[in-house]
Amino acid sequence: MSKEFSRTPNCVFYVCCGSKCKKRGSKHLYKRLKSTVKEQRLRRKVQVIKTGCTDHCKRGPVVAVMPKNEWNFEVTEEKAMSLLEDSSQ
């Protein structure tokens, strides 16, 4: 089973890793977000999860930020880091 969280994160980033988003760099975005969360010790505040296709293939990579219900399309590494910074405050 998965590890039990002692605390629910304030924010969850869902990174689409469907085949078309992956071709546009979502796998790299996912890894970069995960490593930054770990390096900055934000695990209690932010969780990063990769998902299957979100049906926005022409607008990928897609990153959904919850609970804000904020969908971000054509996300670059710079945009992803900005989203993380905004969400971790």
Image (cartoon, helix red, strand yellow):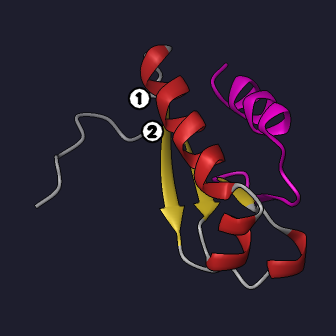
Q: Is residue 88 magenta?
A: yes
Rendered view: 8 above or below 52: above
Rendered view: 82 above or below 53: above
Report whether 48 appears left or right of 59.
left
Q: Which of the 4 image quarters holds residue 23? A: bottom right
Mark 2 lies on a secondary structure that is loop
Q: Which residue in the rendered view is the most extreme toward the bottom?
A: 55
Q: Amino acid at mark 1?
A: Arg
Q: Which of the 4 image quarters holds residue 63? A: bottom right
Report whether 52 appears left or right of 70.
left
Question: Which residue is depicted at the point 70% across and 58% down?
Answer: 64
Question: Which residue is depicted at the point 69% across and 31% down?
Answer: 84
Question: Which residue is depicted at the point 72% across and 51% down?
Answer: 68
Position in image of residue 21 (x %, y %): 72, 69
- Using the image, tell me which numbered label, if any, was put on residue 55: none
Q: Nearer the viewer, residue 25 or 11?
A: 25
Residue range of the region highlighted in magenta in the rendering: 66-89
Q: CA–CA distance between discs 1 and 2?
A: 7 Å
Is residue 3 at least partly visible in the picture?
A: yes
Q: Which residue in the rendered view is the most extreme toward the front?
A: 23
Q: Quadrant of the N terminus?
A: bottom left
Q: Are marks 1 and 2 in contact (CB under 8 Å)?
A: yes
Q: Is residue 10 magenta?
A: no
Q: Which residue is mark 1?
A: 43
Rendered view: 48 above or below 19: above
Position in image of residue 71 (x %, y %): 80, 61
Position in image of residue 77 (x %, y %): 77, 37
Q: Which residue is mark 2?
A: 9
